[in-house]
Image: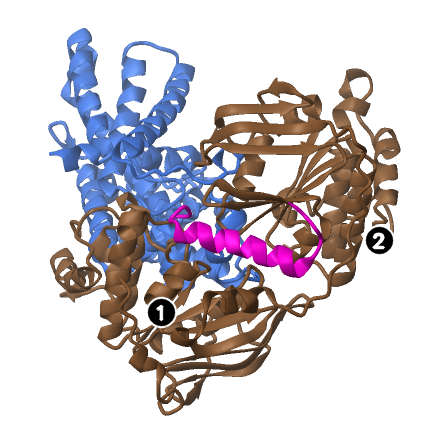
Chain colours: A blue, B brown
Amino acid sequence: MRRALRVPWVPLLVATVVAGLVLSFSTRAFSNTFNIYSILQIAAVDAVVGLSQMVVLAIGDMSLAVGGMAGLVTVVVGYLYQVQHWPVGLAVLVGLVAGPVFGLVNGAIIARTGLSAFIVTLATGTAFTGVAYGVTSSIPYADVPSVLVRLGQGRAAFFPYLLVVALVASVLIGSILHWMPFGRALLAMGGSREAAVLSGLSRQQSTIIAHTLSGLLAGVAAVMYIGVLGTATPATGTDWLIVSFAVPIIGGTALAGGEAHAFGCLVAGVVLATINDALIVLNISTYAVEMAEGLLIFVAVFAGRLGQEAAGTQRPEYGHRGGHVGPRSSGQGAVAREPLDGAQVT
Amino acid sequence: MATREDALGDNADVAVPVLELHDIWKAFGGVAALSGANLSLRAGEIHALIGENGAGKSTLINIATGVHQPDRGTLSINGVQVEFPRPRVAVEHGVSVVHQERNLVSKFCVAENVCLGHLPLVCGLVSSRRMVAEASPWLERVGLDVDPLMEAGRLSPGQAQLLEIAKALAQRCRVLLLDEPTSSIAEGELAHLFGMLQSLRAAGTTILFVSHKLEEVYALCDRVTVLRDGHNVLTARSLAELSRDEIVHAMVGRNVQTMAMRQQELSSHKEARLELVGVSTEFGHRDVNLTVHVGEIVGLYGLVGAGRTELARCLVGLGKITAGQMLIDSTPVRIRNPYDALRNHRIGYVSEDRKGEGTILAHSISRNVGVTVWDRVSGHLGWTSERRTRGSVEPPVRRLNVKMNSFVQPVASLSGGNQQKVSVAKWLAADAELLIFDEPTCGIDVATKEDMHELLRELAGQGMAILLISSELREVIQLADRIIVMGGFRLLAETENTGDYESMSKQVMREITQASSLGMMS
């Protein structure tokens, strides 16, 4: 039980359920099946977008290309189906292969050049979006496979089919990070790069794997979103940047790497969608929605830090008052902290 | 604890060494760290490697573990020559190192840290049950009695050390290098660590024990190698036949001519610029009493980890003083941050981390020096400009004789020594009256080093109060009026500097080794 409480998204889930109950008593519009369904439908897409970012955060990198990759996958699927008249299955399959390929490109560039992931994905992400707009001349493919629409908009009472996809994705990613050797390597790399490298794990390999997975998940999110919208628009993903960070962080994933909570993404997706919905149902301005989301990020991060302190895992870092971010190699740590590239004289 | 097996000291030349480093040379940016160092480890011994700071111990270890490549010299394992291009290769050859800094993934559990790099799998999946089963014998071996599923970040420093040793053993290491293993662990954990190391030795593991605590060396080790200035002074000598004095002698060297002393021009009325009275800090300093007078250089000597840098940081408000009083010009002060220290109390801190904290490498010389004076020289509406700052920037830069092409040249394009001068110049521009120099000559060439020394003397001559932190005993004895020895976050001794290297260095080393034998440094 104590273990469960230390999982960062558990309190969040409890809070959301309570808030949902309160809302459903205060307004009738909230608790009807269709409203719940639409909350969960948005949450499902957001969760997968968040997972796509989370696998990169796990190794201590960031990806600004989640949206760009998704946009391009959308265009690939739309083009193959509408223009080339490929069968649905094949078009979607190619789209789902394209995603990881885009991610692989990111990962390979980062691993090869040693440039920061932030810069590389800023560049490639922008380029992907550009290609998506260029190929389509900004015109969405309106002819979308009906099976995708049925998947994206279908439901059993309040339960959207898409939620199954999100559930499966988060269970799979969670399992990979927890039980697969390469998943553990991702977290080790994010937790302590030196320790991981000295233990014989490959930094390049982890970088490539993380970004490829990210591309795959971005592709999955894109296909889900085609179904939700009923069109394949190149604008897909252009506004996913904030969500892609907000979801994993609210869900308890560490921005610095080394800690990831796949199921937390699902919970955070539900939280964000609920807030969004609640404020609309309660007739509050949409501007307030974004403000509330911003505040929630703060609350989630501070709650996470309090949790860490309570667990006693955060030891005072030397020189932390100096306003440094992260450990600084001054004093006694100089030699050991950078054993791989620091040219230190005793 | 004292179960030294002298029998091992005999038949020295018969056995092939498990790990041998022969005639190792290594320089970093023109500064020689090692010049013909040797190390030879025999199976099943605990071998001590000692030497002053800067003697080359860490470089030698880094070469033995594949972190650095030697410029010249050979490594061999059981008589077979090998190369360690990467740390991983050294590990595969059975050479593991445990650093002072923990190399653990703190979010992972204890068992996973032991198995990191070779996780046990069941059907391709990581099995935490197998992981625990695999890690348990190694944890037992080092006597680490904790829940294997506990997060590694929650271990005490001593436990974390044991965990690292367990990790090394799990990688099937035959040679275990321990870099200052006792510097951060508690007294109670020490006996346990030593007992464990002795049982490892009995089982045939070779251990290299890097320490400067002679007491520990005598209690634990069989043979000793002493480094000084990058080469061997004593090589693989049995400790049974060496006295403590002989070792101290070897560490500091005996044939050093007395160096030119700073002219004692201190006037009879010495005003105290900085006084610390019974100061304790958040870093763990206790009862520190220290005075720096106008025009005086006070040398703060100690080994790495003694708490000198941390004390300096507290003086400029980068750490909290939790008890006692700090006085500037006899007035009690509380320094909130470096800005406050400079603006209101004229204290400047020349960081040891020249590239990281001392200068902004990509910025120009004038911007680097001007950073301290911008708000003073800025005009209406707070605008500042190259022209406005030049007046304050130019004199100190000229005075320090920084070798440069222009003021707008980036600091990154200067040599290390000149970078250091720039980081000093900014404090001169700001009219600092108390300067704290933290390892001012670390990693700069000999000529510039002389320049820096000259500069320090000159500044003091003009009335600057200087607190000089240095790990180089020679430098301290050359420059300081008084020498304060620090160890384990306390002041161990304070002495007037006679300038005679031989007597002073022995006195200082004796203070340090004595303090450690009294357990004050753990």
Q: Residue at x 35, y 81 (%)?
A: B9
Whichever of labels 2 and 1 marks the residue nearer the N terminus, that label is: 1
Q: What label does residue B403 carry, if any?
A: 2
| Magenta stretch, residue numbers | B496-522
**Disc 1: which chain?**
B
Q: What label does residue B221 carry, if any?
A: 1
Principal secondary structure, stretch drawn in magenta: helix
The x and y percentages for residue B2 are 28, 65
Q: Residues within 10 Å of mark 1 (few under 14, many from 20)?
A: many
Residue A154 falls inside the magenta stretch: no
Of tags 2 and 1, which is closer to the observer? 1
The x and y percentages for residue B57 are 51, 66
Residue type pointed to by label 1: Cys
Q: Residue at x 48, y 36 (%)?
A: A320
Residue B443 seen in the figure = no
Image quarter hosting the N terminus of chain B: bottom left
Q: Quick check: A63 above or below A160?
A: below
> How many numbered markers are drawn?
2
A82 left or right of B307 in image: left
Q: Residues within 10 Å of mark 2 (few under 14, many from 20)?
A: some
Residue type pointed to by label 2: Lys
The x and y percentages for residue A134 are 53, 47
The x and y percentages for residue B382 are 76, 20
Q: Residue at x 65, y 26 (%)?
A: B341
Residue B509 falls inside the magenta stretch: yes
Q: Quick check: A106 above or below B73?
A: above
> For numbered disc 1, what is the local secondary structure?
loop
View extreme (bottom): residue:
B14
**Disc 2: which chain?**
B
Verify CB contact (< 8 Å) between mark 2 and mark 1: no
Residue B296 seen in the figure = yes
Q: What label does residue B61 carry, if any?
A: none
